Image: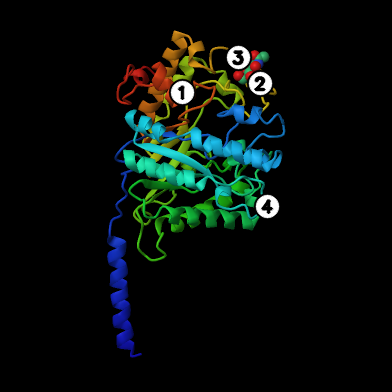
Amino acid sequence: MAPSLLKAISAVFCAITLVLADNPIDPAFSYGSTKVRGVNIGGWLVLEPWITPSLFDNTDDARIVDEYTFGQYQDENKARATLTNHWDTWITQADFIAIKAAGLNHVRIPIGYWAFDVSGGEPFIQGQIPYLKKAVTWAKHCGLKVLIDLHGAPGSQNGFDNSGQKMSYPQWQTKQSNLERTSAVLRILVQMFEDDTDTVTSIEPLNEPAGFYGDDILRPTKQYYYDSYGAIRYPYGTPKEGNVVAIYHDAFQPTSYWRDFMPSPQWQGVAMDTHIYQIFSNSEVERTEEQHLQVACSRGPDLSSFHLPLIVGEWTPAMTDCAVYLNGRGVGSRYNGTYPDSPGVGSCQGLTGKASTFSPSYKTFLRKSWEAQTITFEKGAGWIQWTWKAESADDWSYQAGLENGWIPRNPEDRKYPDICSSY
Ligand SMILES: *[C@@H]1O[C@H](CO)[C@@H](O)[C@H](O)[C@H]1NC(C)=O
């Protein structure tokens, strides 16, 4: 080929690439300018003992502590029947209608890798995907946006029961094949919803990698995050960018750690997720109600000054770890001193379980906790409460909060609009 022709062709190609690159992306939800207000669909497509203790208690086998052992230590047909019934009933279209009616704009839906791939011989029961698709249809019909969150990766990225497999130290990072399987699952997930980007406006490639263990986890996490950007942001295998926003969990690191992470304009369609709980250490459960509110309010400046939209993708009005099995099936709570080496602040009676056992002053505190947090988290890009419903932990349940008045039916309707000015 004549050099001049080559030059001409490459000039045209470059021009096309430039035009494509200059095309601003157009996500169906403007993260960063519109506040995210949402709720997690917890304990549905990923089991958690504390959200549905009955599913675990009914097995009569104390070794069943997560979804992995749920498939491992009981008859497969029985496990499948229980799970199918759970998927059919725990969340239905009526829940999505109620979520929309509560003035929320987002649902975050956790899903585990095992819904897509059990090629490692894992004993997980599959069958979640049709429900995920159904949920996206429900959201589309009522105008909710969906953040799909890969909540568990092969080998477990954090060792928590909610990653599918509870263990003392995560194993995800120990094998290249685990990382490759995670990337492959992510690509399937992205492609599954590539025609639904009006509804599935964001995807979170990994929930809560255990960055508190240091570089052993952080290094592979960052590598996987950069790989995920390609999968989520360039779904067509061409230089054309998609409209789905990649939302990255902060791996429990402070915003300062992510100071240089994927800045615009080189990177587009990126947001960050942080989870704010005040209940998973002795010093936190020992805080007074006033201290809990004060700490919640103190997060505002940090949330508002990050270079990416920063969403609080998990949090709760609950300020104790009293919910049964919250720390794991058969594990006690720090608050009442039944967890190893815990202080025992007081009795859990009337602080979790059914709202009918809650005193008026406790319900007032939950309302203040809800308002202090939502007000503060809207200094950032918004919030997604954990979780929509729980069998017997109304302190965590958005649905119970609505029914019992500590969560307003319109999230802008605040009783304590100045709560954070007093701290
Ligand atoms: C402590 O709290 C846990 C979780 O709510 C509960 O299961 C347990 O019965 C409580 N134990 C005592 C001794 O109060």
Q: Kindly indicate whether the residue at mark 1 contacts the one at mark 4 (C-beta within 8 angstroms).
A: no
- The amino acid type, in three-letter code, at marker 4 is Gly
Which quadrant: the N terminus?
Answer: bottom left
245 and 83: which is toward the camera: 83
Give SS at disc 1: loop
- Circle 2 is placed at which residue position? 342
In this rendering, the label closer to the viewer, 4 or 3? 4
Distance of mark 4 from mark 1, alpha carbons? Answer: 39 Å
Instruction: Of the two numbered discs 3 and 1 on the same chain, state the one appearing first in sequence.
Output: 1
* In the depicted structure, whether residue 246 falls above or below residue 144: below
Q: Position of residue 149 (x, y in %)?
A: 48, 44
Q: Residue furthest top?
A: 360
Q: Nearer the viewer, mark 3 or mark 1?
A: 1
* Residue at the spot 68% in from the left edge and 26% down from the top edge: 330
Q: Amino acid at mark 3?
A: Val
First along the sequence among labels 2 and 4: 4
Q: How many marks?
A: 4
Specify the quarter for ligand 1.
top right
For mark 2, does the 10 Å Cα neighbourhood hold few (<14), some (14 to 19), or many (20 or more) residues? some
Labelled pair 1, 2 in contact (Cβ < 8 Å): no
Going from N to C along the chain, the mark reached first, 4 or 3, is 4
Label 4: which secondary element: loop
**Residue at label 3?**
345
Real-space Cα separation, disc 1 to disc 2, in angstroms? 22 Å
Question: Going from the N terminus, do you reach mark 4 or mark 1 first?
Answer: 4
Q: Is residue 28 visible?
A: yes
Residue under label 1: 317
**Picture quadrant of residue 406:** top left
Residue at 30%, 86% in the rendered image: 5
